[in-house]
Image (spheres, rainbow, N blue to C red):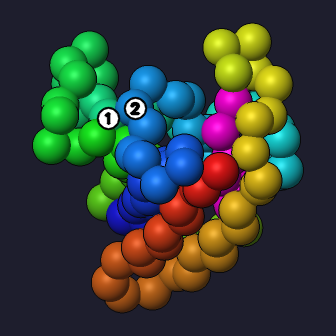
Amino acid sequence: AHPIIGTVYDAGNKVSGLIVRVSAVPGGPPAINDSITGVDPKDPRRADSSLQGQYLLALYEGQQKKGNWFVFIITQAGDILSDVGNIQTSEGRGCNIGTVDFSH
């Protein structure tokens, strides 16, 4: 698996309710379902105060694949709100874990 995790901050405060996307190209379509900060990744309809500002994007559950990924915050309309972070994953044993935090 290749989880990408992170936290979104605004003026030092963790921000929930933002949409975080991972794509194969900067600003592109989602590679997997978008994540919403502060929401339980196992139940996206449930806000979890212990996850304030945090997100999880789980690429290739149970697999290892080489890839070049771009992570960014978007609006409901799909417009980019943040800088674009970049993560590379590799094949082989073990798990690739990437962290991309956003701060404004």
The amino acid type, in three-letter code, at marker 2 is: Ser
**Alpha carbon distance from label 1 to label 2:** 5 Å
Using the image, tell me which numbered label, if any, was put on residue 38: 1
Q: Taking 85 as reference, is 51 above or below it?
A: above
Mark positioned earlier in the residue sequence (1 or 2): 2
The residue positioned 26% from the left and 14% from the top of the image is 45
Q: In terms of image quadrants, where is residue 44?
A: top left
Q: Nearer the viewer, residue 17 or 10?
A: 10
**Residue 76 location, x and y as percent?**
66, 14
Q: Which residue is mark 2?
A: 16
Q: Which residues are magenta?
A: 69-74
- Secondary structure at numbered mark 1: loop
For label 2, the SS is loop
Give the image location of residue 80, x and y in percent.
79, 34
Whether residue 47 is visible here, answered yes or no, is yes
Q: Position of residue 24 (x, y in %)?
A: 75, 52
